[in-house]
Amino acid sequence: MGSETSFTRRTLIGTVFGAAVSLGSQAAPSGEQSPRTRETFDFGWKFFKGDVPGAQMPGFADNSWRSVDLPHDWSIEGPYSKDAPTGGPGGYLPTGIGWYRKRFPAKPEGKVFVEFDGVYQNSEVWINGSYLGKRPYGFISFFYDLMPHLHDGENVIAVRVDNSHQPNSRFYSGSGIYRHTWLVRTNPIHIAQWGTYVTTPQISPTAATVRVKTKIRNQSPAAQICTLRSEILGTAGASEAKQEIKAGDEYEFTQDLQLTAPRLWDLENPYLYAVRSMVQRNGNLTDQYDTPFGVREILFDPDQGFLLNGKQVKINGVCLHHEAGSVGAAVPEAVWVRRFNTLKEMGCNAIRTAHNPPAPEFLDLCDRMGFLVMNEAFDEWRYGKGQIGPYGYSLYFDQWHVRDVTDFVHRDRNHPSVVIWSAGNEIPDQTHPDGVQTARELVKLFHDLDPTRPVTAACDQIAAQPKAVPPEFLEALDVVGYNYVDRWRDRREKYYSIDRHKYPRRRFIGTESRGMGGVRGDYQWLLPDAKPSFFGFRSSGYLDTEQLWKFVRTYDYVSGDFMWTGIDYLGEARWPRRSASSGVLDTCGFKKDGFYFYQSQWVEKPVLHLFPHWNWKGREGQFLPVMCYTNCDDVELFVNGKSAGKKGFEFPRLGMEGHYGHYPPRARALRTTQDLHLEWDIPYEPGTIKAVGYKNSAVVIQAEITTTGDPIAVVLKPDRNSIHADRRDVVHITAQIVDAHGRVVPDADREVIFEIHGEGKLIGVDNGNPLSHESFKASRRKTFHGLCLAIVQSTNRPGQIQVAASSSGLRPSRLSVETVRSET
């Protein structure tokens, strides 16, 4: 879409499309200048936290306001307060009212639009003092036509953001213009916003039909005969059509293009094509627009579960919120890249956008990296939730839900990663008498906008007593989403089996289930004298999680499961906690032990992970549990070179022999447990515990944990050695507290001071500790179990970023990261 300079569009060059096509090129034929441009509008804003009368007027003096780039989230800057109006849902961080202003040059020619990918919340926008409109929903993308209010020369746009009514979300929302903004210039005859819709109604190994619906808008003063040419870039597929469109009207073309020997979009090879739409009038190009798409076939089947391109795929899913720890809701794309890569390493293949529409680049990454997406619209419908009070989306639902769903679906329906829509999460309407009608209305709206995907809702009261979800509500859904099925049906009742027997044509999916959470590096729950603490401990909860997953992976009719959650998130907390710890990654993106549980179930390569750490001074001689997540047949444990015995998994009793690939033949050796982990009780002595994993009687993997020495140094480890000099890209730098052998000291909590010089700035520090009230925007951070994280963002100049870290009494560390000129 135009000459884009964002990180998202640059990364598409040569990587997204199989034909090595750049989505951002948009070159017009014969060397002509493209009639459409789409430029970043993120830089050069002024910001003031507070309400200011008259700030929408062009002549308002904003010289004293703070200069900021977008995306921007002022809430993440803190400070924390037990008395913050957001309370636990908002992570005890501030909100309020804020103003943004930006001066920019423009010519009042053609059409000029401003796009907002997301503003939280109740945004109002003015251009040169003229009011453009209001959008209450903070997670929705929207746009405004700036004509005819533009001046020739300098123009002033002003945005008021009101997030003062609290709480209004069950989770941390952030405050401000926290997603990207764009300035779009087109001809009066142009493709409408989100005006293309690409589907693939017929697919075979030799050919695919690509159906392209394109909405053309004529905002010229007279009727025009318009020609639309659509072609699949890099192929011979093309179609041309002509239509007269009245002044001020629009027309939707439907064209079928043929694709020979199509390359399918799937999880291993998420191949993307692009349709180029070219609008002409009297032989002159008036608009050009590229739409990426994937050729793929999806099906939720009552018996086989989820099928992608005709092949059965078990959904190994996680729920994710829209924020990312120390950067809050203003998430650089490289932060998602790092997080998604880690989830891929775990074997995750699906993401549920809990519980609101994500940023557009979030879905771009899912398309490119091969994730399935359950795209969720709302956390409330007409009835509010007790955790939120009167200020949630229910306040706006009646007036705004049709427009919000329409914009949501139109924006996201070309993403091949999106395989199912979710209309809502744990909405109270599910048990209200009129909730059935609301569900039917929403499902019909989704189907009208996109008939190619099913619709679900995440229901948490399906068998709750005394008031359960009525069958009519669930019948309105294409796929029934179960939140926490084990709350009312445990493994003795075989989870989904009762409903499967009663409703054999129902399609099942676990929209939310308890995961392997906990606080990274905290093992108090494992100790024989464990006591409850602010961190809490899981006791036997992980056993229930194991058994539920065992059931899901066994029975084909269950499409899969989205566990809660992939990554820790801010909010949904109780003081002094400021974040929830249900993720398998913490807020820094550091791996917890639960990461390796899912990896042992979701990947084929050998996995062997031991925990806890082996630094237990003062507990010598006490028996401590040593736990192991693995997909090996058998594991032998050694303590300081002496065998503590070999253990393996008992044959399952639910007909799962050989079903999943991780279970050995019946002739295999020692079987000790029906759980999905192995465990030894070992008298503690300092030294090394070592595990040896076997498959088919051969050693395939080893792992060990060693008692560390005292801390002697800080070590810095970047996730990348060079980043783009574009004011957006970031490098993650992990600070480790290590002993003389370079081993991370797991009980070292030492303050680390960061210094940044050169072409970068520090935008976030964190340690994953849910009790930490240190500022995310400071230049220092205390390590938590030996680790903390700094996120450094580039300037727009190529060069070097020098990073130094020091801690009292320890050897300091330095490194350099190169910043390189971005591709255009």
Image (spheres, rainbow, N blue to C red):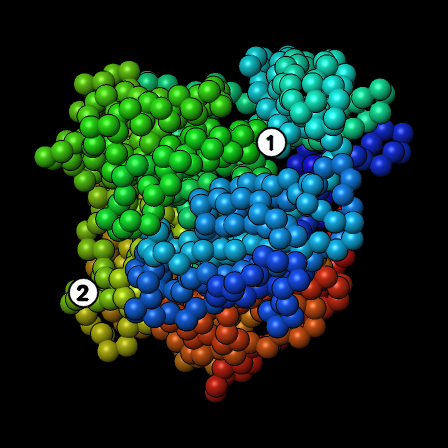
Please indicate, yes or no, whether residue 365 appears anywhere in the rendered image: no
Q: Is residue 602 left or right of residue 730?
A: left
What amino acid type is highlighted by mark number 2? Pro
Residue 56 shows which numbered tag? Answer: none
**Image quarter (top left, top right, bottom left or bottom right) of the N terminus:** top right
Q: Residue at x 40, y 58 (%)?
A: 164
Q: Residue at x 46, y 40 (%)?
A: 357
Measured as percent of width and height from the top left, residue 322 is found at 45, 49
Query: In the orientation shown, which residue stands out farthest toward the left?
Result: 466
Measured as percent of width and height from the top left, residue 777 is found at 50, 70
Can you identify the residue that label 1 sits on?
194
Nearer to the camera, 538 or 634: 538
Please indicate, yes or no, whether residue 468 appears anywhere in the rendered image: yes
Can you identify the residue that label 2 sits on?
532
Q: Secondary structure at mark 1?
A: strand
Q: Quadrant of residue 225?
A: top right
Nearer to the camera, 599 or 291: 291
Residue 53 vertical placement versus 457 (above, below): below
Query: In the orientation shown, which residue stands out farthest toward the bottom?
Result: 809
Label 2 Cα neighbours within 10 Å, binned few <14 / some 14-19 / many ≥20: few
Q: Secondary structure at mark 2?
A: loop
